[in-house]
């Protein structure tokens, strides 16, 4: 459509100024908002463009005409509207305030005087030239008429406020505090005003005040649906007032969203780990498969899905064909599922073997528990962890192991390889020697580091304290 331009969601009229008038107009293009948004009916857009184009065409003719050209009243009006748009003054904007404080009226009067001297001084030529016996130019007449449009309509009102809109809405709806549904609407308004205050009724203020109010309610753990419901009568009041007074204000609803609370993984502490270990080793009332899972998880970073797929052939302890003096698990990684990593076992080996004999089947270490869901394993493990601390989960054991690695200064390559962090922010090394790290020399080095990391569970003979790994 000719002269139609789009910017974001707004529609504009824009056209080039005729070449011979560019110097007189002072610009190469003229542009004016249509007051319509993308998606408006074509007929409405076309009518608005035609109306504005008629104003500019009249303005261009006025600038191009000599003093012999006589303007009709209608020509003066439509050209004056184009002139007001060019200088950024709205119809009635310079009219005296009908109400307001003394200082507001004084400030407005000073503003009007500045605009008159800077933008409308050409209107004085009409009187001067008539006194001199000459005919004023068409442009002078247009500026004079533009001043009339800017100042003569009914007195300009001070900007409408939220309070104005609500009072108008209340009067129209005859809100009664004794009626429950209406009392709720009044309470919603009072709550809203207490948070955001009484502001000028502008598109930006309407939207941002909803955001501020929503944030205050979310801080109190109010649900987004309840916040939206409380805003309904307030937005209805704004829309009614805007429609009634034909204000150029958009009432757009703000959609509050439930805040996502990011909580850090609860890490099991060493005192908690020691307490858990003693419980699992000594309390036979705990299911054998759950005890076995906890013995393996407590001293490593093994997760539910990895335990679920752990086969008897991948538990290398004394008696296994691959045993060379180091007990370890060959863990199928829980994420990639296509690579295995060595996880040294340094505590509770005897009890682990005993429990494996009770619960395993011909294939899986955990027996029947291996055929259940990961969440089932997690649920069973968590029940025991709650005896230690109510906020501990299965992942607390994994992240506790990593935290102890940091504290003990375990090499990053060990953290990655034995811990299974092969991607993401915790991964340090990517090029693992998959074959070399299951050699006996590498396994013994991993076992040494693992003992250090799990020093609360197992001690060397030099420590001269009771060893829990013999449980």
Image (tube, rainbow, N blue to C red):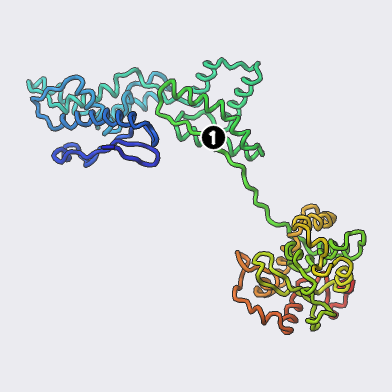
Give the percent coordinates (x, y) of residue 382: 80, 56
Residue sitting at 61 percent across and 71 percent down?
Answer: 428
Please determine whether, in this image, residue 113 is positioned above or below residue 284.
above
Q: Quadrant of residue 329?
A: bottom right
Residue under label 1, please give it: 210
Residue at 25 percent across and 24 percent down: it is 147
Return the x and y of residue 339 as percentages of the image width and height.
66, 72
Q: Which element type, helix, strand or loop, lies under badge 1?
A: helix
Q: Residues within 10 Å of mark 1 (few under 14, many from 20)?
A: many
Residue 20 appears left or right of 286? left
Q: Is residue 112 visible?
A: yes
Task: Please say if 175 is above or below 320.
Answer: above
x, y percentage for residue 98? 39, 18
Residue drawn at x 64%, y 37% is 223
Q: Who is closer to the viewer here, 368 or 80?
A: 368
Q: Which of the 4 image quadrants contains residue 121?
A: top left
Residue 409 visible at all? no
Q: Quadrant of residue 376?
A: bottom right
């Amino acid at each position: 459509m000719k002269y139609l331009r789009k910017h974001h969601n707004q529609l504009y009229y824009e056209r080039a100024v005729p070449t011979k008038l560019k110097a007189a107009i002072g610009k190469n293009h003229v542009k004016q908002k249509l007051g319509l948004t993308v998606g408006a009916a074509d007929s409405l857009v076309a009518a608005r463009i035609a109306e504005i184009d008629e104003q500019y065409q009249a303005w261009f003719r006025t600038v191009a005409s000599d003093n012999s050209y006589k303007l009709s009243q209608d020509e003066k009006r439509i050209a004056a509207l184009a002139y007001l748009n060019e200088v950024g003054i709205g119809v009635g904007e310079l009219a005296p305030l009908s109400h307001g404080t003394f200082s507001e009226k004084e400030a407005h009067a000073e503003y009007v005087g500045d605009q008159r001297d800077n933008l409308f001084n050409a209107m004085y030529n009409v009187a001067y030239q008539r006194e001199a016996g000459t005919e004023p130019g068409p442009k002078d007449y247009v500026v004079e008429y533009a001043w009339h449009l800017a100042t003569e309509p009914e007195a300009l009102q001070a900007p409408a406020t939220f309070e104005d809109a609500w009072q108008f809405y209340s009067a129209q709806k005859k809100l009664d505090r004794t009626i429950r549904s209406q009392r709720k609407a009044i309470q919603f308004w009072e709550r809203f005003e207490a948070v955001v205050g009484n502001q000028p009724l502008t598109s930006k203020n309407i939207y941002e005040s909803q955001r501020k109010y929503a944030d205050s309610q979310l801080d109190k753990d109010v649900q987004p649906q309840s916040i939206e419901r409380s805003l309904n009568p307030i937005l209805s009041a704004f829309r009614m007032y805007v429609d009634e007074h034909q204000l150029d204000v958009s009432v757009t609803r703000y959609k509050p969203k439930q805040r996502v609370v990011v909580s850090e993984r609860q890490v099991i502490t060493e005192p908690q780990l020691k307490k858990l270990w003693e419980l699992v080793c000594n309390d036979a009332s705990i299911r054998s498969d759950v005890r076995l899972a906890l013995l393996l998880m407590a001293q490593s970073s093994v997760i539910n899905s990895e335990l679920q797929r752990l086969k008897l052939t991948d538990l290398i302890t004394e008696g296994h064909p691959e045993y060379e003096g180091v007990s370890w698990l060959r863990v199928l990684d829980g994420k990639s599922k296509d690579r295995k990593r060595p996880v040294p076992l340094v505590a509770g080996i005897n009890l682990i073997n005993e429990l494996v004999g009770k619960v395993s089947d011909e294939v899986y270490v955990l027996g029947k528990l291996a055929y259940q869901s990961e969440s089932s394993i997690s649920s069973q493990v968590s029940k025991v962890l709650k005896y230690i601390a109510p906020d501990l989960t299965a992942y607390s054991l994994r992240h506790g192991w990593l935290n102890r690695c940091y504290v003990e200064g375990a090499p990053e390559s060990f953290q990655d390889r034995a811990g299974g962090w092969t991607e993401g922010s915790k991964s340090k090394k990517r090029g693992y020697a998959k074959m070399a790290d299951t050699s006996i020399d590498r396994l013994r080095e991993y076992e040494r580091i693992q003992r250090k990391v799990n020093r609360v569970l197992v001690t060397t003979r030099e420590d001269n304290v009771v060893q829990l790994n013999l449980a």
